[in-house]
Image: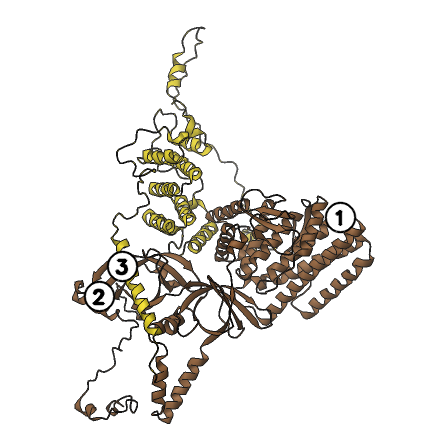
Amino acid sequence: MKVAPHFQRPDGRTDFERTRNAVRALLADAEPDEALRAFMQMEIDFDAGVFKVKPDLLGSVLCWKPEDREISAWIYDQHIELAELARRAADLFERRVGGDDARTIRLVGLAFMHWGEAAKWVVGRRDRYDYSWMHWLMRMAMGANRQLEQCEVRLDARARAATIEGLFFRTLLLDRFAGGNLTRQQIEVLDAWLWEWMGSLKGSATWPGEAVFRADLDGKGGLRQGRRADDGPTLYLAIAPLEAQRQAVIKEFHRGRIVPSLGIAADFRVEEHVAVLEQLRLAFEAPQDDDAQRVVRRPAAGPAVEVWVGLGEIVARGLQADMQPANPQVALTRKASDALSDTQRIRAIQFSDEYESSRRFLRLADASDTGFGFEASEKESTGIAVGDLLGMRLSDEEPCVLGRVVRRVPGQVEGQVVIGVRAMSEVAQALTLSRTERQGRPDDDDLFIYVPGDDDTGAQDAFLVPEKLLQEQGPHETRIGEDVFTLQFNRVRRKGRGWALAGFEILDAKRVEALPEAHEKPARAAASTPIFEPAKDVPQFELVDKDRELDYSNAWDREVSPRLL
Amino acid sequence: MSMTLRSAATQFFGMPPILRRREAGPARRPAARIEPTVRPVPQVAKPAGEVDFDKLLAATRKAPVDLAPIEWEGDARQAKKAGEGTGTWPVYDPTITMDNDPRGYDARCRRIRDRYIGARFPGVARSAADLESPERVIKSARLYFEDAQPDMALELLDLAIEQDSRAEALWLAQLEILFLGRNAARFIECARAFRALHPASQAWPEVARLGLALAPREALFGTANAPRQHDHYGPWPDLPNWIQANWDLTAEVVAVDLHRILKQRGQSARAARAKPQLAA
């Protein structure tokens, strides 16, 4: 029994590259049968080697180690090379044995399959394909009327069969979803479904009069939506059968079954599958006019924008500052610096350094009505992932803008990362909510982010809350001026990494004077934003005459009375 | 690794036990008990032309066939189970559930279903057990519907109905949401299933009334009666509020208030921030 190559080891990879080069040389001189046989053998070896490392690479939700990245990049490169090799072979075969020969068509199918696989491994890279060769091959297959021919391929140590057309659409669909919106596990789930849906990946050369994806066969782009305006060669893929397949997957989940039950995707978390279901829904429901959905992007001059990641950081550094005048600390620091002792000055500098070093600046690359595109180094973007909540202030005069990360892909330059952020609100504000049934916990009074809705009814208003809060059913109350509102979170409008945008209903509203005495205290405590509750165990002092004797002409001379030191 | 349980004796060198017990022979059957029997009455051939009263009486025991419900296969099956042929509407049988009852799933399937529900409906349900409160489910479904996510509302109700198909309220809420979404095809499908599972439901006339407005040619809903008083405020019939929307609008009014107050607060804070600061 032949042992699968070890691609974890550099020598295993080098051996395979050597074989690949030998097959490439063989293509020009050898007989078609021999060349095809050599290609197929190399493919089987490659699949066996990849299948060996794939569970480790995709099975873990942890970040990849550098060696994992290296293998993944290598696999991606090999798929591209194999696709190019199959494309060249198909081109040669077409001239030698004709475009309608079964061997030529098989090579076309293999080229499609490898381009599709590359699209899966490209997750996290920014490469865009030039699909002109792919469209040319598809036109060739259609010209020979062989696009519905079954092509046997081997993938993940399993033999599979699909039509040329099915493989073509699979590649284009994977490419469409490989733009950084789906994780590597999610794109694998999508691919597993696409193999199950091969029967629905049927094209038609004429517009079927319904919602469609389309491939313009005389262009070099990927999948588009809607009817083509001109009469160029186009292959349409109806969306309704795909939606029916999506619904069938949902029904299977209702029955407690994962689709497909075999393969690496079956071992991924159910959450990954649910995320793909949602992404598919968005894609299927997208407007059919490609131009309509493309929002105009305005290139920004690349200013460094301070961003905050996560609820806590956004509240502490972004929204609380909104409630204060801009840069008040500048005046205070200048005034204080002359009077500070050396120790105090060193402390202040240390504190300032720590604060500065923990700040994160990203370069704003472009902006549109719906979001922002940032560029950053790997270091600057550490810890920022798809689904994170981001706060940013585009300039000192502007309020804190909230958004969520919807895309993260490496940039054109090595070590650079492109982050796509969809704007959520620019009028959000921090608000203190208190549990009505206090549990004696530090977070009985906590700051949350109020996100107003677009309409004035308040029906679309929501709070950004930590995800764990959703497990609580108890109401909260907040005091704004003389009004106390009791509200309860009752739905989740959106969810990300550690946060949820929770809708709420108002259970009660009272004026403060209507509250009973015992109830009023916590309400009053919660009224101000932010809350700085005095520590309970610290001894209380009051000013006495001795204190009054001190000279406070210079307020920065002493921070605390010497009596207390 | 699979293991086969063996008797201890066979584990010694694979040898069978020397002193094997005599294999038990077939169990001796007890002597057949003689039950008293009623000798059947010999069938007397009726002379030709004479009326067969037995046959007629047997025929009257069968109800006239109602064509509309048996167009749907599942409906006919359920109707038969519920006592079709009694001449009246079949009585409510609490043991009748949908074919696909999750309570019969194995542990793995139940776990996957639970995980799916938790991931799909965060903040609403953590597992299938959370769907067993119709009131809570209906409220969540209504909120999804109000948030322009009718698919999520219907799926949540689907799951809850699968969990407990006897809960009439869930069916009715689903029917109302389908009606509000003007989804005629699915409304008819859902109404058929509801009719089969809850044939004695008091709410059927209301369902039929909505169904007639949505699909006037559908035989399932019968023919339209004369409109009742206050049946319409507009072109569509009044709704029965099976989705349990709150009649009291105080909360909505207060929500407007909260929105306004916070909007003003935000605007004043931003205005204060935008003011130029005095030089230090």
User: In the displayed structure, would residue B143 be above or below residue A184?
Assistant: above
Give amino acid for label 1.
Gly
Chain B's colour?
yellow
Q: Which residue is disc 1 drawn over? A: A99
Residue B46 visible at all? yes
- Give residue A32's position: percent from left, percent from top: 80, 53
Real-space CA distance between mark 3 and mark 2, rounded to the nearest whole angstrom: 13 Å
User: In the displayed structure, would residue B81 be above or below residue A184?
Assistant: above
Chain A's colour?
brown
Q: Nearer the viewer, residue A145 or A253?
A: A145
Element under disc 3: helix
User: In the displayed structure, would residue A241 be above or below residue B64?
Assistant: below
Q: Nearer the viewer, residue B73 or A230?
A: A230
Q: Which residue is disc 3 drawn over? A: B257
Q: Residues within 10 Å of mark 3 (few under 14, many from 20)?
A: some
Real-space CA distance between mark 3 and mark 1, rounded to the nearest whole angstrom: 72 Å
Q: Quadrant of residue B93?
A: top left
| Quadrant including the N terminus of chain A | bottom right
Labels 3, 2: one chain? no
Which chain does the numbered disc 3 sit on?
A: B
Q: Which mark is residue A482?
A: 2
Residue plotted at (67% across, 65% down): A6
Real-space CA distance between mark 2 and mark 1, rounded to the nearest whole angstrom: 81 Å
